[in-house]
Amino acid sequence: MQNSVLTFVPLLAPLSMLLYTAWVLSGKGIRKQRFMISGQLPAFFGFVMALIGLISIVKYATATSPLLGIDGLGFSIRMDMLSMIMLTMIAILGLVILRFSENYLDGDPRQHIFFGRLATTIASVELLVLSGNLFQIMVFWIITSVCLHYLLVFYRHRPQAIAAARKKFIVARAGDISLFAAFTIIYLQFGTGELAVIFEFIQNSGNVAINGAFTWATGLLVIAAVLKSAQFPTHGWLIEVVETPTPVSALLHAGLLNAGPFLMVRMSYLLFESVTASMILMVIGGLTALFASVVYLTQPSIKVSLGYSSIAHMGFSLMLCGLGVYSAAILHIVGHSFYKAHSFLSSGSVIDLVKAKRILQSKRKGNPLLILLSIVVALGIFYLSASLWGLDLAENFSLFIISVIIIMGLAQLMTQTIDAKWNLLAVGQTAVIAAVAALSFLCFEHFAQLLLQAEIPAVYNPHINIAILASVLLAAYGFVVLIQLVSPWLRETTVGYSLGVHLRNGFYANVLFDRMIGSLKHDKFKWANLTVKEEQELPSVGPTEEEKEVEMMVNN
Amino acid sequence: MIITSNTTRAAISEILRKGSRFIAPLWSLENFVAVNVYMGMADMPFDKAMDFLYKSAKTEGTLPVSFYLNALQKGQFTPEDISQALKESSFDRDLDKFLMTLYEDTTPDDNLRISTFADVANEINGKKWSRFMVDRISFWAAAYFDEKQATWDTARQGNSLYQAWKREASVDFGTEVMGLRGFRKYVASLPDDYLDAAKVALNHLELSEDMLDYYLNALLMKLNGWAGFAARIDWDAGLHGQKSHQLPEFLTILLVWESALKQLLRHKELTPSWEFAKHETLQMLSTGNIARSLAKRLVLQQAFDNAQQRKIIALINEQGPVKLTKKAPQFQAVFCIDVRSEAYRRNLETVNRDLATVGFAGFFAFPIKYVQLGHEDGSNQCPVLLTTSHTVKEQLPNETNPGSALKRRFLQSHLSKAIKAFKQGAISCFGFVSPLGIYFLPKLVSDAFGWTRPAPAPGQVGLHPKEIAQLDVSLEQHTHTEVTGIPLKDRIDMAASALKAMSLTGNFGRVVLITGHGSSSANNPHASGLDCGACGGHSGEANAKVAAAVLNDAAVREALKQQGIDIPFNTLFLPALHDTTTDEVKIFTSSYKKHPAWDQKSINELKYALKMASEMTRAERAGRMGVKEGDINQKIMDRSKDWSQVRPEWGLAGCSSFIVAPRERTAQLNLEGKAFMHNYDWQKDKGFGVLELIMTAPMVVSSWINLQYYASTVDNKVFGAGNKTLHNVVGGLGVQEGFAGDLRVGLPIQSVHDGSKYQHEPTRLNVIIEAPVDEMSIILSKHESVRHLLNNRWIYLFAIDQQGKVTYQYDKDLQWKVI
């Protein structure tokens, strides 16, 4: 009982956001002075509540609030390590992003509307992760997307924003339908929508009867996640979200986009049972990760390149889910969230970095022996760290796969220093960074597993098909990394040149989508009311609020 | 139908050159200097130029009528000002009748604008082909001009701009996927040489000569950002006497697109519509009248300008008696002519009565190329109209162990590069984010609360605070890879001309501050736009240090004495930096503490005065920045570090006049930070060489700044950078608004508008010079380009007479009228 009372504590986080929305939208045309205290207070309060939830969950076991509804469908709060980690993360992001928006959008005549939409979106993501039953997940799955829609069309006169909204509309509805179908099947199979009951059933029954309907359900879940996280070829709308103010990008890329991997982890007990669904996830996620992280290299603008980067990281997280290492997926999305929120909010600083680049830098040599040496050093550092940590990689195939990917990263890092003008100090420092990365990975991954063990299936050696698929993907990754490390011979060739052009265009998936939704036509779209509006004049006319006040005082 | 297959290449080249002459160069964000976007039109009357742009590029030449009506209501200008303006216009002089016309709806000729073929295609079935064309070209140009963003360069191929584009357009499927079938084949079939290709396109479009100027400008203005960037490359080449034709090549790309649309779009109405559009255009141009709705607003703008002139003249003429001092003050402080110096100078003089300030171009007449510590290459620290004369390196004094500092700087820079490769490489990025992503949490929070800066200040990478304080310039000559330093003879020449140009050839104080200026903002792509324009969009710190080092040089002083400039042995020049965002003034004393003229007591007194003046100026500016209660000093400091602040300061917003006179003429006036001020004493100016310099350099530069603000205010969509909250830095060199569209020029809307009103109200610059009008006429007769600015009303010129009153106004063609 004590636990179910406690479940209301995290609920206060989204509630405070919703209250704030109501308050902000009730006052028209208010300017910053009133936001100053207001915006951050509820956000900070929400953060404290989330933190209390997180701390108490370490002490107490998973708990679900009483259900407000029938038949395991309705409104209930599930308080477990997964929901608390996600909630705390979102609350922190919410605080930072709301704070950022106060000055950033100051002077925009519709700033209060922006704040309202931002706060509602934060609340809906929080309620999504807190969901204790299928109905609630479904509802907030849709609401987050609707909220995002309104943030995306904050400037209704921008044709590109409208085009993005149209694409997102189609993708999101398709995702909603998939999720709805999946949940319907699950509900019919288990006879309840209550997550706790479903999970308990699966855990206790040992192995679920894998029938056709079950495979369909997991497959549809995977599709819903893939669509939510903007995987290839439906990613076009995501890179165009830069048509709306930067804080939205930060919130989307660091918060909302995670809904895909979150759903996979939330439903991991089910997903885990279906090799087919896991393999679909790995193929789509793994290939998107490869595709988007290469496209990233070709993009000439900062925000669009960050968009591709997010697509890549979502793909990678989904692939980890397919591989069955859900803890690593969560570790990745949490790390990615903070990293990407910071990248977007600080994207104006890129000019500072450009200026700093004028410092004399040693060029890469492209010496194959030195590159080989770098790879060996990276391997060595990781191996040593793993031994130090007491981990035997041969024991666990999935972890082995991730470790190899980490080592690929370390190799890239070491090559920058070793395959350049030799400098012992630089090599030493780079090696230290590599060691920190390796140890951090081992340590965080261990704790992620430890913390989440109740919510996710234990990591064990995957099905042979999955193992083969993972090896193929790994080989492809290795090939790309190798090409990246050895000199850029590829881009000099005709094939390389053409490939570069096609990649920069994201293999034209987005243009094709644009054509399908008729992006060149500003007024016609058959699925929703999404037309480009006329731009409004700036509020240069008429006295300001201040002047009105003065006038009133004079009159009185 | 003038272009045929027989047209010579030279003729095509001339057509392209003429058609692109109205595109102003655009500088990269690293040194974002103000540019007069109308500079190519200076030989046209202001009204005509606005009409030309209105008709060809759909740009607005003024703010909407509502702005002026509101200003009229608030009394910012009066009906008499309008009457005055009407006298010179084509309208009936009846004021009431004119005011009535302001409320009428648009007149038929208002909608008549030039259509390009893409515009015509837009109207056929609602598909916005022109937007698609702009987006495709812009996406390519971003990759082609990209300097620092993409790791994998996928565009810089071929021998020239046009050829690189052609190669890509023959490979890229994008345009065809959107429905323009055969585009790749069509482009591939064109000649490799841009002139030949332009000929094919022009021939195909069948344009008549009369509309060519309008048409080509209409086309280029669709992408005036990238066109401007290409124009800047041509500009730089021109300064060094080299040939470059990036802009004509860029224009060719647009022409080819137009031609391709004509060739490939299948719609039976297209050809007749295009013929009709051309016909309409010719008809519109045949009248030669200014579009009516624009003409009305131009009258209002003229009236608004008249009122501003009235006010500034009254301010100067109605002040109390002015005493011209002859005594040397204890302190002098040279500031940039920048409008932001005005408030500070006024407050500083109020705090210390024994201190005189001087206004002079912020590079202090030392046009150097400055190589920062450990840098590969230098930056040009001078107005963009000039080329640099000497290369000067930054250095650390020997007692700081410069070797180890440099090593640290290199190491830090190398490590960031390695980490960047790790963080952003394909696949390797996953290995970065999984373990290290979480470490961004503390960084995210500390940046959000302003405890840290999102990216280290570029000049300080790898250096300890103590070392940063001791950074200095090296005048000694070195010949390593290039010749650096300034030889003694040049030092003497530069010192003499600088002091003469400042009208500072005697009455030296104990301490003379040479105060450059810079700004401090975080996470602001347009940060360099707040720095010193006279230093080419950089902080003026380096120029101040060089100037002080030269002027303290004993050998230089010795030589100056022979030229009649006697600097007392106990006068010390000290470099300083005015941070215009925080209004702090920092003196760089570290190199001069052992100088014989060092006097700790004076320095302390000076520092105290500076501190007081900073606080007063901050308090003065606070209202304009919306900082009201609480610790104003702290709040203004915080703004300069706030990564979410889109208005760290107001820059030069409000700039409306340029006063060239002895300081005493303005010393008692509060010019509200809206005036450029240049010290000038014509009686000391033998031969009026200095006057000529002022009228051809600082005056032109101030007009550039003023007109940049004008353009960014009246049409932020075309000549401004749009909304800062949507800015997406492209290629490490410019911004784009959102996902697509052209590179943006000019200032963001947040830099001219505070959310409820314009902080910069469009006003053409009023230049007020205290000098004999005849001498000014002689100078103007020598310089056609400056004369154009005045004759065509891009700026106004007034003269102060011997009694210190503004009495004459330059009218036209070297004629003056008495006010």
Image (cartoon, rainbow, N blue to C red):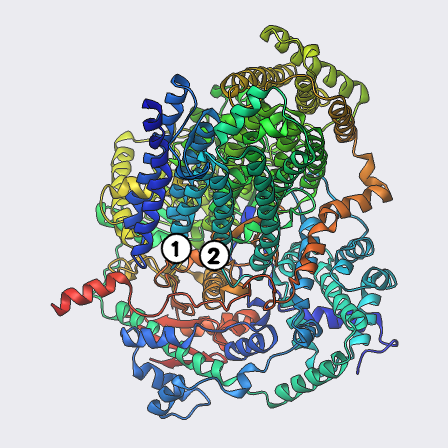
B653 is higher (above) or lower (below) than B527: below
Give the labeled residue for mark 1.
A113
Q: Are marks 1 and 2 in contact (CB under 8 Å)?
A: yes
From what the image shows, is residue B670 above or below residue A311? Answer: below
Q: Position of residue B458 (x, y in %)?
A: 52, 35
Mark 1 residue crowding within 10 angstroms, few (<14) / some (14–19) / many (20+) = many
Report the residue marked by disc 2: A154
Quadrant that contains the N terminus of chain B: bottom right
Left or right, residue A502 beside residue A115? right
Quadrant into which the C terminus of chain B falls: bottom left
Residue depicted at x 58% and y 69%: A523
Is residue B460 visible in the rendered image? The answer is yes
Residue B462, position as x, y percentages in the image: 52, 26
Q: Are marks 1 and 2 on the same chain?
A: yes
Among the two numbered marks 1 and 2 on one chain, the one whose residue lies closer to the N terminus:
1
Asked whether residue B365 is in view, the answer is no
Mark number, residue A443: none
Q: Give the answer, above or below, for where A272 lies relative to B267.
A: above
The quadrant holding residue B483 is top right
